[in-house]
Image: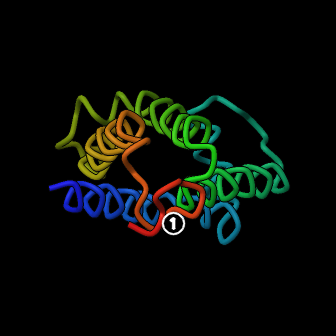
Amino acid sequence: MQGNLKLGLFVVRLTVFIFFAVWAGEKFVNPASTIGIFSHFYFIEDLPHWGAYLAGGFQFAILLGFLLGFAKFWTYGALLVMHSLSTASSWAQLIAPYDPGHHLFLAGVPTLGAIFLLFLMRNEDTLFSPFSRSASE
């Protein structure tokens, strides 16, 4: 049972990493999209391109720590806070899921649940985590 739990937590950690790596990568591949998102959802007007790159670099640093299980309270917690704010900022899309283009915003809700689970279970999430005591289990 313990092995199944550790494997399950690793799979959730890996898939959450993949989900967010796409968003972090977009900040480099398409900074104009990031600028539009920051303007529309976070009310940050006129974000310069370097601001998108900076945000992407920060997000990738958090994600790498998250994937490797480094400083779990801080990396898992930072991801939980970032995604909580992101999900909350899309409340208008969440309450109208059948409006054109809105249904995909709901994917953020179970992702938020997965991150919350990982934050709560961070001490058990040790499989393939070089910074955990039992990383080789």
SS at circle 1: helix
Residue visible at 70% across and 67% down in the picture: 28
Quadrant location, the C terminus: bottom left
Q: Quadrant of residue 116?
A: top left
Q: Position of residue 108 (x, y in %)?
A: 34, 45
Q: Position of residue 130 (x, y in %)?
A: 57, 64
Out of 137 and 29, give the one closest to the viewer: 137
Task: Tell me the kind of residue under disc 1.
Answer: Val
Out of 44 and 7, give the one closest to the viewer: 7
- For disc 1, the marked residue is 22
120 vs 21: above or below:
above
The colouring scheme, among rainbow, by chain, secondary structure or one colour, is: rainbow
Q: Position of residue 65 (x, y in %)?
A: 63, 55
Residue visible at 60% across and 31% down in the picture: 42
**In the picture provided, is 78 more to the left or to the right than 28?**
left
**In the picture provided, is 21 more to the left or to the right than 65?**
left
**Labels in figure, total:** 1
Q: Quadrant of residue 11?
A: bottom left
Out of 98 and 68, give the one closest to the viewer: 68
Residue visible at 37% across and 43% down in the picture: 118
Out of 64 and 120, give the one closest to the viewer: 120
Q: Position of residue 1 (x, y in %)?
A: 14, 56
Residue visible at 62% across and 60% down in the picture: 64
Q: Callout 1: few (<14), some (14-19), or many (20+) C-alpha neighbours within 10 Å?
A: few
